[in-house]
Image: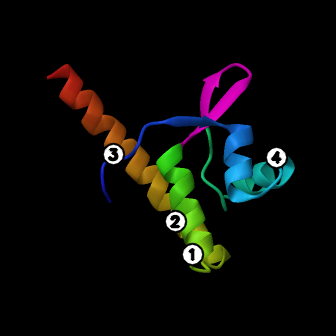
Amino acid sequence: MTAPNYKIIRFAEAAKMVGKGRSTLWREIKERRFIPPLSLGSRSNGFIESEIQAMIAALAVGFNDEQITELVKKLLVEREVQAKRLLEAVAA
């Protein structure tokens, strides 16, 4: 996977990008069929744009629910790996 785009997009924009409503997106997040957002504060959430683009690509090629769930797992692992790399580079 290439270096992620760390642009944060708000929940409403992400829902619009994937063509789903807020309730549907929250349900899919709960069911682990959509990448969870980052907490931006006590009442604010956002998504990493490149992760949303990966979700859209998966939908575009017809991933089934099992494949989507696996993609979400991989994206979460990659999110952590990339964040650690970035933090290590900054701390060095």
Residue extending farthest left: 92
The residue located at (51%, 52%) in the rendering is: 51
Q: Are marks 2 and 1 in contact (CB under 8 Å)?
A: yes
Judge depth for marks 3 and 4 and give the one in front. 4
The x and y percentages for residue 60 are 60, 74
Q: Which comes sooner in the sequence, label 2 or label 3?
A: 2
- Please tell me in which quadrant of the rendered image residue 38 appears: top right
- Residue 14 on image: x %, y %: 67, 46
Residue on which the image places disc 2: 71
Of the two numbered discs 4 and 2 in the rendering, the one whose residue sits closer to the viewer: 4
Marks 2/3 in contact by CB < 8 Å: the verdict is: no
Observer-nearest of 43 and 57? 57
- Element type at mark 4: helix
Residue 23 higher or lower than 69, as above or below:
above
> Marks 4 and 1, how far apart in space?
22 Å
In primary-sequence order, the first of circles 3 and 4 is: 4
Question: Mark 3: few, some, or many residues within 10 Å (few <14, many ≥20)?
Answer: few
**Quadrant for the C terminus in the image:** top left
Magenta residues? 38-48
Q: Identify residue for label 4.
A: 22
Residue drawn where x is 37% and y is 46% of the image: 4
Q: Mark 4 or mark 1, which has the lower sequence index?
A: 4
What distance separates the C-alpha of mark 4 from that of mark 2?
A: 21 Å
Q: Which residue is mark 3?
A: 81
Residue 41 drawn above or below residue 30: above
Q: Earlier in the sequence, mark 1 or mark 3?
A: 1
Counting every numbered tag in the picture gives: 4
Callout 2 crowding tier (Cα within 10 Å): few <14, some 14–19, many ≥20:
many
